[in-house]
Image: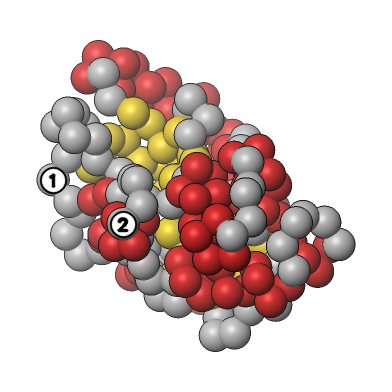
């Protein structure tokens, strides 16, 4: 019996190890490395450094979190280069901020559990949000490669396609980020967090008004 329990424990640790490797890899990159966009590499890095651990309203720009509009406004301020929101969106995609299906947010070992969760659990979340007239966001993070120090892009994409994000060196799910997802109307906000964070990396106290849900993850199953 103890041997079987030990084998199960080892399997869970191995699954969590592969899950961590999957989520730590990230797929964000400095767009200039890919030879597209209007900014030089140095200009894009300066943009990222300015955004790191700062919010738009701290730089006298519109919005509690970064969006393609506020990124375009910051580019014009820093580099005197007009940038359309569509062009800014290309940089966000290069940084890994793209709409993804729930199963695409999971490591291969978690995919089956995520599909089951989507069929059995998510419909109730969606119904509750509709009744509450609340927004639903899908949250995750990507590692920006080609940037020093190690930098994460923490993003939330709403079911309406709105992208809100922050740039940070912190590995945890930032409480300030969740707070800034709340609308000024006082309505609730539902946030589905993928396996980018373990339970230990969640805020100890979730902001009032935020309902935090977890996608199944090997990391959380330990």
Question: Looking at the picture, how far across and down is residue 146, in whole percent?
Answer: 70, 77
Residue 210 vertical placement versus 61 (above, below): above
The span from disc 2 to disc 1 (Cα, nearest Å) is: 26 Å
Q: Which residue is mark 2?
A: 60
Residue in the image at 50% along x and 42% along y: 69
Element type at mark 1: loop
In the rendered image, residue 137, in percent from the top left (x then y), is placed at: 41, 37
On screen, residue 20 versus residue 31, left or right, reads left
Q: Which mark is residue 197?
A: none
Residue drawn at the location 83% of the way across and 62% of the way down: 34
Q: Which mark is residue 208?
A: 1
The reply to whether dot 2 and dot 1 touch (C-beta < 8 Å) is no
The answer to whether residue 127 is above or below residue 67 is above
- Pick out the residue farthest to the bottom: 149
Q: Residue at x 53, y 30 (%)?
A: 161
Q: Does residue 9 lie above or below 76 as drawn?
A: below
Residue at the image point whose x is 34% and y is 45% from the top: 63
Name the side, left or right, on which 22 lies relative to 136.
right
């Amino acid at each position: 019996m103890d041997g079987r329990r030990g084998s199960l424990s080892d399997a869970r640790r191995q699954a969590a190890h592969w899950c961590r490797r999957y989520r730590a890899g990230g797929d964000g990159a400095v767009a200039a490395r890919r030879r597209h966009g209007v900014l030089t590499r140095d200009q894009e890095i300066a943009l990222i450094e300015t955004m790191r651990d700062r919010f738009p309203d701290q730089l006298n720009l519109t919005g509690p979190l970064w969006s393609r509009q506020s990124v375009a406004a910051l580019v014009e301020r820093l580099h005197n280069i007009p940038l359309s929101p569509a062009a800014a969106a290309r940089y966000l995609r290069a940084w890994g901020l793209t709409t993804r299906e729930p199963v695409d947010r999971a490591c291969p070992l978690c995919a089956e559990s995520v599909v089951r969760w989507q069929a059995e659990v998510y419909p109730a979340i969606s119904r509750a949000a509709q009744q509450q007239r609340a927004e639903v966001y899908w949250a995750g993070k990507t590692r920006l490669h080609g940037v020093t120090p190690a930098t994460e892009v923490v993003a939330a994409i709403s079911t309406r396609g709105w992208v809100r994000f922050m740039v940070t060196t912190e590995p945890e799910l930032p409480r300030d980020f969740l707070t800034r997802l709340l609308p000024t109307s006082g309505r609730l906000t539902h946030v589905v967090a993928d396996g980018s964070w373990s339970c230990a990396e969640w805020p100890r106290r979730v902001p009032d008004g935020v309902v935090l849900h977890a996608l199944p993850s090997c990391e959380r199953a330990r």
